[in-house]
Image (cartoon, coloured by chain):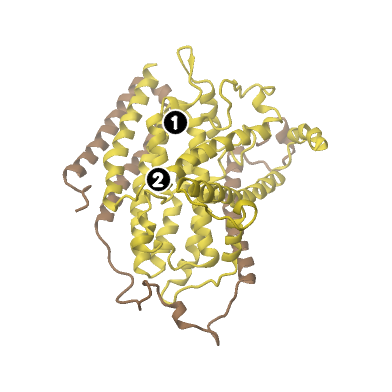
Amino acid sequence: MTGLLAAAPVLAGLDPPYWVETLIKVGVVALLIPTTALILGIVFLFKVMSWMQSRLGPQEAGPKGLLQLLADGVKFIQKQDIVPDAADRFVFKVAPMVVLISTFLLYVIIPGSPNVVVESLDTGVFFALAMSSLSVIGILMAGWASANKYALMSGIRAAGQLIAYELPMVLAVVGVVIQAGTLNLNGIIAAQADFKIGPVPFPFFILTQAPMFLVFLAAAQAELTQPPFDMPVAESELVGGYQVEYSGFRFLFFFMGEFATAFAFAAIASVLFLGGWSIPFVTYDAADPNNFYHSWVFWLIGPAVLFTKIMLVSFLIFWFRFTYPRLREDQLQKICWKYLIPICLVWVSVTAIAKVVM
Amino acid sequence: MSGSGAQAAHTAMDYSDFLRQWLTVVIFGFLALGMVGFMLGVGSLLRPNPGKGGTYQGQKYLTYESGVDPAGFLWSQTQVRYYVFALLFVMFDVEAVFIFPWATELERYGTFGLIEMFVFIVLLALGLVYAWRKKVLQWL
């Protein structure tokens, strides 16, 4: 361990060739995605959910049942890969892949520290919104190709819901973008670190964009088709919806996609509204190479800080998931078009005026 | 993480950082495909593959309809309501394309940009109000 610590500044100073660097990033992200899905699944879906609903939850597999999800994964791997005779074979098989790939690309832009990021794209948030909306296509494909009435209904409902809730999500992001003046996620974090009204520092955009934060959370929940916005996969009327004909690994892909996307959305929310990797009242200076945020220690601290914020936001998301009853299809569309979008338009205008006047 | 000016010299390839960033994105797209393919490949080695020969169980490949035999045509037509929401979506999504470049440069445009965008947002909001008044947003 001490050897590793001694080597770390040297490692941080290295600038490996592009291909080596990309290979390392690829390896890290490939490991990260199943891990995040597992963490959220175990901590929230099993432990917090059973705690909130006053029941025991899984107890048998591993210490305190912590390995239950791994055991479930092993079970899914052994299952036969069934494609119904009536289904459109090719589209049926490809659909879960599309969903997982859209999740995968979300992880490209999430920054763990100024340096720990796959690519700090200048179009960061916009890229994230575009990639997350790809999953609609996968879900619609799954719903259509299953040749199942439940799946078809669910696919259409999901498409209607996902595109509707994409708008509040986009507009909620616009508020932050106006305030920060950039789409780059690291840039947005830096803008939060030194944002002041007069002499008073406001280290997080949640302080000025609180309505947008709530709208973003609601929209993220709808994009994940989680309760209370789970009409497309409502098990009591659509028996699982577009997932109904899937078994084995392809079913697992949908599950992994949902939870890894939940993690990615929580990460984006914590970057936009909670300052991402930045620690409140520690100043950030992008030009100064001796700044604390550029030191090698922060390569480790940054992701840890971000992870803490992600778990906080995830807790909120899953809290709503476990405690609210399901909304009806019409209520769901009504909330989006009649409440969330107007709120967003008003707040975008308020932010824009404040930005120009101040 | 792309190299700073002094350190970038050792990369023989002479494309800009911008293109290189998007190259990474493309690589990640293929990686995602590769990972999904790899998992399915491992899965196909581990899971039972009875094929449709001797052990074929026809019932298993029927469409699921809560246990009864599937009835009627499976790719049925659906309500037009979803289509209207899709149209509304297109209207607002085009807005997003225009609003992002404006939002990043608002400080430079100042009051002029503010007024211009207000005209745009008000027009869009009018579209929403029109749909609202026409009872398009009402489910039944």
Mark 1 element type: helix
Q: Tell me where residue A33 appears, x and y as whole percent.
A: 59, 50
Mark 1 vs mark 2: give the one in front.
2
Which amino acid, by three-letter code, is at mark 1? Val
Which residue: 39% across, 33% down?
Answer: A212
**Which chain corresponds to the colour brown?**
B
A207 versus B51 height, above or below:
above
Q: Are marks 1 and 2 on the same chain?
A: yes
Image x and y of residue B4, in percent:
68, 31
Which residue position holds label 1? A177
- Contact between marks 1 and 2 (CB within 8 A): the answer is no
Identified at 36% across, 17% down, the residue is A357
Q: Quadrant of residue B14?
A: top right
Q: Earlier in the sequence, mark 1 or mark 2?
A: 1
**Label number found at residue A67:** none
In the image as oriented, which residue stretches furthest toward the bottom? B54
Closer to the camera in the image, A26 or A51: A51
Mark drawn on residue A323: 2
Three-letter code, disc 2: Thr
Residue A306 vertical position relative to residue A290 in the rendered view, above or below:
below
- Residues packed near mark 1 inside 10 Å, few (<14), some (14 to 19) or many (20 plus): many
Question: What's the distance in space between the residues labelled 1 and 2, CA to CA?
Answer: 32 Å
Which chain is rendered yellow in the image?
A: A
Query: What is the chain letter for disc 2?
Result: A
